[in-house]
Amino acid sequence: MITSLALLSLLSSFFVLSASAATADQWRGRSIYQIITDRYALPEGADPTACNTADQTWCGGTWNTIRSNLDYIQNAGFTAIWISPVNQNYIGPRTAYGDPYHGYWMADVSQLNAKFGTADDLKALSDELHRRGMYLMVDIVVNNVMSTTQSLNLSSYFFQMQNEYHPYCPVDYSNLTSEQNCWLGDTKVYLPDVNTQDATVVDAYGTWIQQLVQTFNIDGLRLDAAKHVNADFWPGFCGKAGVFCMGEVYDGDVPSAAAWQGPQALDSILNYPLYTALIAGFTIPGPGNMSGLAEVVAQSKELFHDTGVLGNFLENQDVPRWHNQSVDPQSMYNAMTFAFMSDGIPIVYYGQEQGFSGGSDPYNREPLWPSNYANSTGYQLVTTLNQLRNFLVNGTTGWLTSPVQVLTTSPNGISIMKGNVVSVLTNIGSPPANTSVAVYTPWDNSLATIDILTCRQWAVGSNGTVEVQYTKGGVPVILVPDSQLDGSGLCGHATTLQAKSTTSLSSGAADLGIQRPTAITTSILFVILSLGLFMFNV
Ligand code: ABC
């Protein structure tokens, strides 16, 4: 006869499990805001002028300051956040690359990173996100630890046996075995490679990630340096985690990147092939390679297991800000519209919505607080893109799972259609231009459509053509049949989702009708249980 305690813990672990086991399908309709925890918000009274990216040191952001500034993210329509790694980092003298303010320099992963807060702080952040119907994605580093020397002081790590690490060799990127068994980093800061082929390591990592996910109710994982770990490690690891896994495969080539998505490896990867093609298509000045972008879309649909859950981004902590590579704001606005209106989960890197323009690491990790979290043009565009996408995900059927198709490409533009939404995008830039593009849509003549970004009416012409003039400059255009906007809250249409979206709705939940057990329901069920046990005198 199972004891009361065993039964209780079984039941409570069931609730924890059910509460956070977010799958790829539940993430498909989400929109992610990526945060460098140290750089998002300061505690009350902190000096807002003290943070200088060149110093490569801590500026003061924590899990608590994220929690107390979630409105800025939720009001922009995001339904998930991705935060920096949460585990203990190197503690020691400053290195040639400064201090581990970014969270990637692992020491003992079984401990939390006290620089960002306590276990209760991380739980509080997770609970507050879930109260708002938002998901928590945590960055996880299993490929390596960090060391200032080639010989490891094993006592400072989770794995303390020499054979649990691969011997030192620098990564040779032309050789897969070297990429997976040699050490990232360099001789100033070593990143000793963990032996993820070792059975003890595999088991310990499995138990560790299961506990971390359950303890903090994590909904998804961003897996650092995923291509530097043997692919067959991931299904077991993610199985143990029981949540959506998005791997970092820093590779712009579709065939080699696509090999990392699927039952043999990962649920998803960061879409570096799309990033590389968006840069080549939309940066000004730039190659303006729109046909290359169309090619990547076609190849991706053919080779990726599921383009709908790939992570679409324009910026992150490893690449220069978009505005550093392309000053004209319209180039980012058009590229961002592509990322939101195509297949995949849109990811916005903090500060992108404020037009930050830092260069390579460390200059692309600027503090956000000097922006005063302003309702900037970029912030407004992101908010509208999220509002439309959340409506298409929750208020319509079929948009999320209908594969994107390229309607037209030209040297200065590309038009895509997903579901019944046509996006006409260009790289001609801000200056008004006496040019236009004709887009052939499958729509009937005289169909009334609305451009979501200007709320202007557009009538479809003969043969389903829509003519886009650039007399006001190269702004993105998103056309939706007017009749399909009821309930969206956009362009004067009533809203049926507004109330839900700011409270409990999560893009996935609406579709699948799953409501997270709130604290109240859980405790009621708990009381019923303990009553039951009492009655049965178990
Ligand atoms: C520190 C300094 C840097 C200095 C570096 C040596 O040391 O700050 O200035 O250059 C963390 C910190 C960094 C820190 C590093 C090392 O640790 O955030 O500040 O840099 O100490 C992940 C994370 C990243 C993190 C680490 C390490 C890994 O996102 O933030 O860095 O934990 C490779 C890895 C990738 C890694 C990335 C930084 O390096 O694969 O996991 N990112 C080619 C290779 C890629 C390689 C990339 C950049 O170059 O194929 O594997 O990424 O080095 C495309 C091609 C790509 C090609 C790119 C360049 O061009 O398709 O294949 O990528 O067209």
Image (cartoon, rainbow, N blue to C red):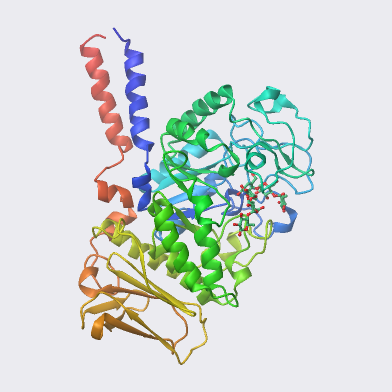
| The N terminus - image quarter | top left
Q: Residue at x 50, y 36 (%)?
A: 234
Residue 502 vs residue 140: left or right?
A: left
Which image quarter: residue 398? Answer: bottom left
Q: With respect to residue 333, does 436 lie above or below?
A: below
Closest to the observer, 142 or 68: 142
Q: Does any portion of residue 403 appear in the rendered image?
A: yes
Q: Residue at x 49, y 89 (%)?
A: 432
Q: Residue 376: horizontal and vertical position, in percent?
A: 49, 71
In the orientation shown, which residue stands out farthest toward the top? 1
Q: Residue 325: horizontal and vertical position, in percent?
A: 62, 70
| Number of marks | 0
Q: With respect to residue 532, does 270 lie above or below?
A: below
Which image quarter: residue 533? Answer: top left
Q: Residue 189: horizontal and vertical position, in percent?
A: 75, 43
| The C terminus - image quarter | top left
Residue 94 vs residue 435: left or right?
A: right
Q: Residue 41: horizontal and vertical position, in percent?
A: 57, 54
Q: Does any portion of residue 377 appear in the rendered image?
A: no
Closest to the observer, 296 or 130: 296
Q: With respect to residue 88, does 496 lie above or below?
A: below
Q: With respect to residue 196, does 464 lie above or below?
A: below
Which image quarter: residue 532? Answer: top left
Q: Residue at x 28, y 64 (%)?
A: 419
